Image (spheres, coloured by chain):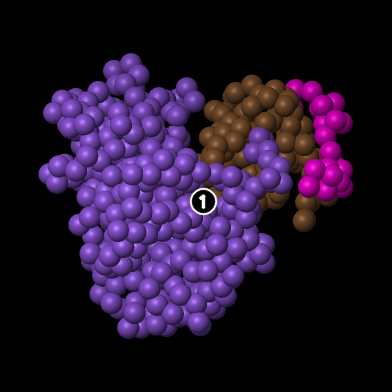
Chain colours: A purple, B brown
């Protein structure tokens, strides 16, 4: 049997929770330059814990930058497809960051902490490039970029019981005050904790940022409260069921927001000259050559990223993310197809290493949680 | 790790149980642990001719797909049909309910090159 080779992990970065992962006997893998836990108890068990109870993820590898100054909001509007100047204190929004030609550099989450103080969260794999790019872009703004990547830990706590547990662990009133996509700061055991009601699993929950030295204590407090530690494996199956895009798979610099279904994070009506605006205006009028769709297998077999998508025996696209859905017990994925084949219900074939797998274009997302609890 | 002493093993983490010229094939405890949650096993049709060290099927975990290699040459006389609906049996009982194939050996001398349980465990210890 062919098993993946062990990759030397010597030169990899470690989060402040590294020791916690080892103590829990996590299986560690290299990911975007970091040594990260891929699983603790097993991917399906962790996946189900998040769907049914509460799980937590070390997401410290994701890039975090604070933006300070008079022009902080205007700068973030310049680097985002969504108008971040609309954010009031305590609000957050998701967006793409685009090159001038409309190609997606990264997908980001921006939070307004105070009128002249924001937090931008970027993908781990893009953090070094995004830092360089933002440093270039910021020159003409009265604003400064503070890299908080190495100095802080970030923990995502997700699942139907996440908020209940978080009320016990970090404070009832504070957690209750956070509506979806809102954020705030509170004190926990003498440390400032940033929290946002966001995530990447399709479940309710919070993402927490705390000083790196205090990260392990917060992690252990959550562990003691019964939260299941979850690795990158479950993070991927959960986000795929929720049809949340993964940068590098479902979008990259060759993709624009229109073709990956990110229309809702592009604001053009404010007239602001953000990076990529002209190209996005130009591209918005015409039907593109491809559209990202959700694919659901109608038989046994598992599509993976890179598998060709066929229609009438001819290749029409490629799977960008694929795998097994523990919730639906079937293979699901996402991929690009021509717009004329992007209708829900269309039957296509995925070539899985030479074998045909029948798939349907499925409604997005694959999994939607039942009505959110207050 | 408890690898049964009466089985033969490969460095690709398959095992072989011999009985009256027919070999039962599966993957080891170590292999199932490395793969994690197994969700799909693809096995050859009965009557298929398989060759030693050649691919006979595929196994998919939530994480990834891996190829399965046959410890011996011969003809497939039976496959474990229960794995179609219950692939997790490979995780739960790799040496028992999780078996995959029964092969009528065409060259019993091939088994001389396979590892004993002790040799396989030494191999695992060296590659760790």
Q: Nearer the viewer, residue A189 or A132?
A: A132
Q: Find residue B121 and report its horizontal and vertical position in percent.
A: 83, 48
Question: Residue shown at 39%/82% (left/top)?
Answer: A171
Q: Nearer the viewer, residue A348 or A282?
A: A282
Query: Which quadrant, please, contains the N terminus of chain A?
Result: top right
**Relative height, residue A351 to residue A93 (above, below):** above
For image coordinates 25% across by 23% down, the residue present is A289
Q: Magenta region, mostly helix, strand or loop?
A: helix
**Span highlighted in magenta in the image:** B105-128
Quadrant where the image shows the C terminus of chain A: bottom left
Could you tell me residue A230's position as x and y percent? 51, 60
Q: Tell me which corner region of the image, top left, top right, bottom left or bottom right, holds residue B44.
A: top right
Would you name the residue on which mark 1 appears?
A233
Q: Chain of mark 1?
A: A
Give the vertical position of A147 relative to B10 (above or below).
below
Q: Residue at x 66, y 35 (%)?
A: A2
Q: Is residue B117 a member of the stretch shown in magenta?
A: yes
**Where is residue B41 drawn, in percent x and y?**
54, 39
**Residue A50 forms part of the magenta stretch:** no
Q: Is residue A202 left or right of residue B125?
A: left
Residue B103 is left or right of residue A190, and the answer is right
Q: As drawn, is A13 to the left or to the right of A50?
A: right
């Amino acid at each position: 049997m062919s098993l993946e080779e062990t990759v030397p992990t010597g030169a990899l970065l470690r989060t402040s929770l590294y020791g916690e992962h080892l103590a829990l006997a996590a299986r560690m893998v290299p990911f975007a330059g970091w040594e990260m836990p891929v699983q603790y108890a097993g991917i399906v068990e962790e996946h189900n814990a998040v769907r049914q109870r509460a799980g937590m993820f070390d997401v410290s590898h994701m890039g975090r930058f604070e933006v300070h100054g008079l022009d902080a909001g205007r700068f973030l509007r310049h680097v985002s497809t969504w108008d971040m100047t609309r954010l009031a204190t305590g609000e957050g929004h998701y967006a793409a960051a685009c090159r001038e030609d409309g190609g997606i550099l990264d997908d980001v989450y921006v939070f307004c902490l105070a009128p002249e103080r924001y937090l931008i969260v970027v993908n781990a794999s893009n953090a070094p490039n995004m830092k360089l790019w933002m440093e270039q872009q910021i020159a003409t703004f009265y604003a400064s970029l503070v890299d908080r990547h190495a100095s802080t830990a970030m923990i995502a706590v997700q699942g139907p019981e996440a908020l209940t547990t978080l009320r016990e662990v970090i404070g009832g009133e504070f957690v209750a005050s956070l509506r979806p996509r809102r954020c705030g700061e509170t004190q926990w055991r003498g440390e400032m904790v940033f929290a946002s009601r966001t995530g990447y699993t399709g479940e309710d929950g919070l993402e927490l940022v705390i000083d790196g030295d205090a990260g392990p204590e917060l992690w252990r407090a959550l562990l003691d409260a019964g939260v299941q530690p979850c690795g990158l494996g479950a993070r991927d199956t959960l986000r795929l069921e929720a049809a949340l895009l993964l940068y590098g798979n479902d979008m990259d610099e060759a993709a624009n927001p229109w073709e990956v279904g990110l229309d809702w994070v592009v604001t053009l009506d404010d007239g602001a000259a953000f990076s990529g605006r002209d190209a996005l205006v130009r591209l918005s009028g015409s039907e593109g050559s491809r559209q990202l769709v959700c694919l659901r297998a109608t038989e046994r077999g598992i599509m993976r990223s890179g598998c060709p998508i066929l229609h009438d025996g001819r290749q029409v696209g490629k799977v960008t993310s694929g795998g097994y859905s523990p919730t639906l017990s079937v293979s699901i994925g996402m991929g690009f197809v021509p717009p004329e084949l992007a209708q829900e219900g269309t039957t296509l074939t995925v070539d899985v290493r030479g074998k045909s797998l029948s798939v349907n274009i499925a409604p997005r997302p694959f999994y939607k949680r039942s009505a959110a609890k207050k | 790790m408890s690898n049964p002493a009466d089985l033969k093993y490969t460095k690709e983490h398959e095992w072989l149980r011999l009985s009256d010229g027919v070999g039962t094939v599966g993957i080891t405890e170590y292999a199932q642990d490395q793969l994690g949650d197994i969700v799909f096993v693809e096995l050859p049709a009965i009557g298929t001719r398989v060759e030693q060290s050649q691919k006979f099927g595929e196994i998919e975990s939530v994480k990834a797909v891996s190829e399965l290699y046959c410890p011996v040459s011969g003809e497939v006389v039976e496959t474990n049909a229960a794995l179609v609906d219950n692939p997790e049996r490979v995780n739960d009982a790799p040496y028992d309910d999780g078996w995959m194939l029964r092969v009528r050996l065409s060259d019993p001398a091939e088994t001389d090159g396979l590892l004993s349980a002790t040799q396989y465990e030494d191999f695992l210890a060296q590659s760790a």
